[in-house]
Amino acid sequence: IYHSIVMEIAMRQREQKAEENNVNVGILWCWNPGYSLPPKDRRKAEGNSANESFRIKGSFFADDSTLGGERQEIEQGRDITVETMRLYEAKCHPDKEEKFEFGRENANEIRMLGSYIGRKFDIKMRLKRLGSSKAILRRRLKHSKLSKKQQAKVTEICAESTALFDANARPWYVSEANQIQRSVDKLYRYIWSSKKEPPLIEMANKDKNMFKVRQELGVTSIESKIEKRALLR
């Protein structure tokens, strides 16, 4: 709450300074209600009276603050924000600051809203988190007395959730969802199996595929979870 108020004060001061310098705060976003996106030429978009618009000045989530703006204002806006935070004894960590420019591919490892900007890097990090969670779970479930369905539910909550954190904040390719599915399926096969022979051999002997295994365990596919989250958003 304190941080939110400080950001509001900083934004008002930023707008006041920008007005004095005759520049705009934020990134202009135009759209035509009920139609496709307006032309790329911003002058045409602004000139159309049917279009609506607003300026994206910042994005704030808890104590994570992202400023948005154009080149002629954003550096000044950043300095004003940092100085305002200093006046109110709020800490700013320059070593944690990240910067990216629209239209350039130099922001792959910058994280926003729980997802990395770079699609490949984001999937890599999601799989890495999932791998760590699976390793811990497999050790914990090795001699578990929980039922197979309960173990699968624990996997959904503790492992899948690490890979799907804020999955609704970005678009997905089916191939990306499949990468996560293949990784988590290894743990589901282990949970489903009798532990008397390798899970894949046991599945072949019992004429089971992964769809049937997940069905028996009562879990839905990664793709359906992503779709649900996107639709809810």
Image (cartoon, helix red, strand yellow):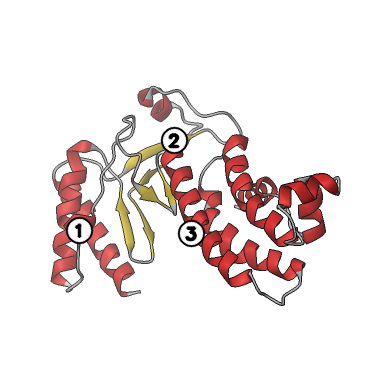
Mark 3 and mark 1 in contact? Answer it, CB < 8 Å: no
Q: From mark 3 to mark 2, how far is it between C-alphas? A: 43 Å
Neighbourhood count class around disc 1 (C-alpha, 10 Å): few under 14, some 14–19, many 20 upward: many
Identify the mark at residue 81; answer none if there is no mark. Answer: 1
The residue lying at 20 percent from left, 63 percent from top is 92
Which of the pair 97/4 is nearer the observer? 97
Above or below 18: residue 11: below
- Corner quadrant of residue 117: top left
- Corner quadrant of residue 144: bottom right
Identify the mark at residue 132; answer none if there is no mark. Answer: 3
SS of the residue at dot 1? Answer: helix
The residue lying at 47 percent from left, 56 percent from top is 129
Q: From mark 3 to mark 1, how far is it between C-alphas? A: 37 Å
Above or below 146: residue 190: above
The residue lying at 55 percent from left, 60 percent from top is 134
> Which is more foreground, mark 2 or mark 1?
1
Which of the pair 140/17 is nearer the observer? 140
Which of the pair 167/216 is nearer the observer? 216
SS of the residue at dot 3? Answer: helix
Which residue lies most toward the front here?
Answer: 196
